[in-house]
């Protein structure tokens, strides 16, 4: 594991106490990734065969890494300006990428008597493969980023330096079973043409060992015994019969089997079942540990190792039945689990960085989430290794709105399938099933997204999954559709994807809408405006002026879709609820409030309804977790890993033991997502006018709430007279010792948001009249005393402790005080994990927050804390 990844793992353990990452199995013997390439346009090459000959003159070609798209490689070579800023990417000439591009590398072969293979996957979208002047595979064979090819190039290589070359053809997601960006972002000018995964060179003797995996059967719910069945394919690639011995260990237990193979014969070795009492069971983070087991096998011929395989697996059980309401209910190790997650986005240019992926997964855990959904863009092996060790569940599947669903999606984008597409789809499913089957973090696979596959496509997928011993659920679609053989999906995709008010999420009456019932596979209120720090990094001053003055104007950093091209719906709501913004600063701070309250309500409504007897909410995938570039929507954190109101609204909602306000019943509820019953709790609610006057106070003692996501009503608030049009609600939950375990502050209105359900569209429900939150502008000034101290944390981290105290003499709360860790230049230090943030304090109240981060990310600077509240002004203190 690279040094930075070790530091990330240490940071992750520091951020999430009690969760340690298990060591990976390490690299497999006899294999090494090609470390990098030289690339060039095919328009500048006259002889294809010459490119892959040793000694070819590649002067003027561009060096790239082991996984790189063409545009990403050219960007790294200084050919273009930062695509994440302004409209720079829009100005890149797409014509440069309408022809194939060459990827060329030299490899060394020390012993040509051994067999040599190229393990090829991740090609977007197809490629001719050449070795030493010979084409060994065509673009019709190496087609699709998910297909995997074991190319035997023994006859083409020689001792010493050899050359390999990939002629990569342009990617077209509407015509290729590939990857596209749909409406998530602007599409890169090369449409991600290139090599998105490592190409691996393998060496072995006459017998190749492939596909080693373990089928696990855990005794549920006792969890006291597991049966492990190891399997592997052995293949004789020589011209003579051989006898091989396959031996090794499964979770430390020895196995061995002799196999006779005719020339060019392949067999599957199935070892006797190994029974394990009191097995080390893998759990999602927060529910237990993440122990990983190892499968170590060697195929030997005449006592000499021919090939070896080393991999990891986890012991766990996943079921996903439909409940009595037809919703998909995931059950892990016998325990029903409320899925709380977000839609994962890779980097827009598919630049893989294991450390950055670990940072993002650490944010998932810090947010109190447990799952990420990968709609297409299924990440490399290292991603799932990270998810296994960090305890983050994953839901991979095929993407919508292009060729993957072109056969079944009517007149939407994506061409209908040809005969050539069916074997590519099945090969893609085979490769992904074999790659992912041993990862305990993988919950299921979606063989459809917006649409379910038809009978012929479904059969190809199901046959591939069955042949691969797929251990997890197979879901027909992420929408409420069913394929011919599978159960209904048990999921819904009813939106919204653009602004709706917080009370929307509590609706259960409209079965074509996205309220908190069933499994909601992707939904949010759309725009998630980044922090001012990020906005200034991604947009010009003129673009920022347009952002706040004219939300109806097209925004390049929103989407290439006409539906999501601007911020008008969000802008109308922001002005209608909070008052028309008077400046960019005012727009951004109001946006943070709107995002916090909305995201909080979305997660709170779904969590509260998890254990309902009728139409429970079994899962929520926030659309999206993050953005692959500098975006104005669909992100809980931004491209630079900065955290805005959306982030902290989600973090607050997903506290393990949590007190919340229910917009539908106007009551206080307590949700217990921990495994154990909580007893002896005290819940209190206080309501305040904007002038600081307390208008309501109520307490409930000796409250008990079962674990596993149960909820209990703490107290009704009822109708309260004398409230200002905008008012504040402070909810506090303390344990039996009087310690505060949850604190939640709401800004509410005596005038409710009214939804026009009859005018609902697939992406939002209009608001016919807005709540009045403009009274927040009348909050008086408040003073916040701040102290900050920093100390070394474990394994290269620093912990900065911040104490905030409202020192105001009157009744005015310090409202929504944000703390940002910054360096000496005032730039945010990222990534960072805050224990809490964006807090509100009444006079005399204090709170202590901690920020944990890698010391190296200070780059030698001393840490400082920038404190900025709605009504407190901004100041920076040394940490």
Image (spheres, grey):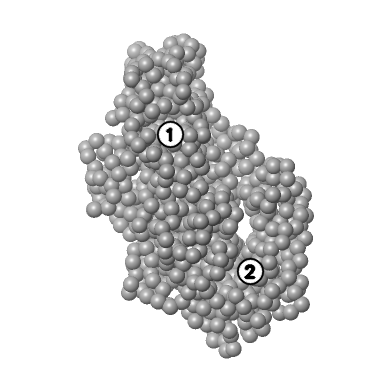
Q: Residues within 10 Å of mark 1 (few under 14, many from 20)?
A: many
- Judging depth in this view, the residue of 721 and 311 nearest the camera is 721
Residue 460 point in image, percent of width and height: 28, 41
Residue 818 image point, x, y percent: 65, 62
The image quarter in which residue 778 lies: bottom right
* Residue at 33% across, 18% down: 47
Q: Quadrant of residue 507?
A: bottom left
Element class at badge 1: helix
Give the crowd class for mark 2: few <14, some 14-19, many >=20 residues within 10 Å. many
Q: Residue 619: x, y in percent?
A: 45, 60
Which residue is at the far left?
419
**Number of the label disc, if any, that sits on residue 870:** 2
For this view, does 378 lie left or right of residue 878?
left
The residue depicted at 73 percent of the width and 68 percent of the height is 784
For residue 70, the mark is 1
Q: Is residue 104 among what the camera can see? A: yes
Rendered position, 314 above or below 698: above
- Relative depth, front residue between 267 and 800: 800
Secondary element type, mark 2: loop
Q: Residue at x 51, y 60 (%)?
A: 545
Could you tell which of marks 2 and 1 lies nearer the N-terminus?
1
Quadrant occupied by the N terminus: top right
Residue at image position (34%, 47%) is 447
The x, y position of residue 762, in whole percent, is 34, 63
């Amino acid at each position: 594991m690279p040094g930075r990844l070790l530091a990330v793992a240490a940071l992750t353990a520091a951020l999430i106490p009690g969760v340690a990452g298990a060591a990976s199995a390490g690299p497999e013997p006899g294999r090494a990734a090609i470390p990098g390439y030289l690339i060039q346009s095919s328009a500048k090459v006259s002889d294809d065969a010459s490119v892959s000959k040793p000694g070819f003159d590649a002067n003027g070609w561009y060096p790239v890494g082991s996984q790189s798209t063409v545009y990403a490689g050219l960007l790294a070579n200084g050919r273009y300006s930062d695509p994440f800023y302004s409209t720079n990417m829009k100005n890149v000439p797409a014509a440069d990428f309408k022809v194939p591009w060459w990827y060329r590398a030299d490899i060394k072969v020390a012993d040509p008597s051994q067999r040599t293979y190229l393990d090829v996957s991740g090609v977007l979208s197809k490629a001719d493969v050449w070795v030493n002047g010979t084409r060994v595979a065509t673009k019709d064979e190496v087609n699709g980023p998910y297909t995997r090819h074991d190319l035997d190039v023994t006859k083409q290589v020689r001792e010493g330096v050899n050359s390999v070359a990939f002629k990569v053809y342009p990617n077209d997601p509407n015509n290729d079973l590939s990857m596209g960006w749909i409406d998530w972002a602007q599409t890169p000018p090369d449409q991600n043409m290139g090599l998105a995964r490592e190409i691996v060179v393998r060496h072995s003797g006459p017998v190749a060992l492939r596909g080693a995996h373990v089928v696990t059967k855990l005794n549920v719910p006792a969890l006291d015994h597991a049966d492990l069945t190891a399997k592997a394919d052995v293949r004789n690639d020589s011209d003579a019969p051989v006898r091989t011995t396959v031996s090794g260990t499964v979770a430390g237990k020895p196995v061995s089997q002799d196999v006779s193979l005719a020339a060019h014969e392949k067999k599957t070795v199935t070892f006797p079942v190994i029974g394990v009492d009191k097995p080390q069971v893998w759990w999602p983070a927060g529910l237990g540990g993440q122990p990983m087991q190892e499968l170590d096998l060697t195929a030997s011929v005449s006592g000499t190792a021919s090939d070896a395989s080393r991999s990891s697996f986890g012991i766990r059980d996943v079921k996903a039945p439909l409940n009595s309401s037809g919703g998909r209910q995931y059950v892990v190790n016998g325990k029903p689990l409320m899925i709380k997650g977000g839609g994962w986005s890779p980097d827009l240019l598919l630049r893989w960085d294991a450390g950055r992926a670990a940072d993002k997964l650490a944010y998932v855990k810090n947010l109190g989430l447990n799952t990420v959904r990968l709609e297409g863009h299924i990440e490399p092996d290292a991603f799932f290794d990270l998810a296994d060790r960090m305890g983050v569940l994953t839901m991979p599947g095929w993407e919508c709105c292009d060729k993957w669903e072109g056969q079944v999606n009517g007149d939407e984008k994506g061409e209908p399938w040809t005969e050539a597409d069916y074997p590519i789809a099945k090969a893609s499913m085979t490769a992904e099933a074999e790659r992912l089957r041993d990862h305990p973090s993988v919950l299921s696979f979606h063989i459809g997204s917006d649409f379910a596959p038809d009978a012929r496509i479904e059969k190809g997928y199901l046959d591939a999954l069955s042949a691969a011993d797929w251990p997890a659920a197979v879901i027909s679609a992420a929408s409420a559709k069913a394929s011919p053989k599978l159960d209904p999906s048990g999921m819904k995709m009813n939106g919204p994807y653009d602004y709706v008010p917080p009370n929307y999420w509590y609706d259960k009456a409209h079965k074509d809408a996205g309220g908190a019932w069933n499994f909601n596979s992707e939904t949010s209120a759309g725009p998630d405006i980044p922090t001012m720090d990020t906005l200034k990094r991604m947009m010009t001053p003129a673009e920022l002026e347009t952002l706040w003055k004219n939300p109806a104007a097209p925004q390049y950093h929103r989407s290439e879709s006409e539906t999501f091209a601007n911020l008008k719906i969000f802008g109308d709501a922001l002005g209608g609820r909070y008052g028309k913004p008077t400046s960019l600063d005012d727009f951004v701070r109001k946006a943070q409030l709107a995002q916090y309250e909305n995201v909080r309500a979305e997660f709170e409504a779904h969590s509260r309804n998890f254990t309902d007897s009728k139409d429970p909410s079994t899962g929520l995938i926030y659309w999206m977790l993050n953005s692959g570039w500098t975006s104005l929507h669909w992100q809980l954190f931004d491209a630079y890993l900065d955290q805005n109101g959306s982030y902290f609204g989600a973090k607050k909602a997903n506290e393990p033991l949590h007190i919340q306000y229910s917009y539908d019943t106007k009551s206080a509820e307590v949700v217990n997502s921990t495994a154990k019953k909580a007893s002896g709790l005290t819940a209190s609610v206080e309501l305040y006018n904007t002038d600081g006057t307390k208008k309501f106070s109520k307490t409930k003692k000796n409250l008990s709430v079962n674990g596993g996501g149960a909820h209990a009503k703490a107290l009704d608030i009822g109708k309260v007279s004398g409230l200002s049009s905008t008012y504040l609600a402070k909810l506090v939950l303390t344990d039996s010792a009087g310690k505060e375990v949850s604190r939640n502050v709401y800004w509410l209105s005596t005038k409710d948001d009214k939804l026009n359900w009859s005018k609902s569209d697939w992406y939002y429900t209009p608001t016919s009249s807005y709540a009045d939150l403009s009274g927040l502008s009348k909050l008086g000034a408040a003073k916040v005393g701040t102290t900050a101290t920093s100390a070394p944390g474990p394994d290269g981290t620093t912990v900065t402790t911040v104490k905030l105290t409202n020192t105001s003499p009157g009744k005015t709360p310090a409202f929504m005080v944000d703390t940002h860790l910054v360096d000496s230049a005032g730039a945010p230090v990222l990534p960072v994990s805050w224990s809490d943030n964006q807090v509100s304090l009444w006079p005399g109240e204090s709170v202590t927050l901690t920020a944990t981060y890698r010391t190296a990310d200070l780059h030698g600077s001393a840490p400082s804390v920038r404190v900025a509240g709605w009504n407190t002004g901004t100041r920076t203190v040394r940490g």
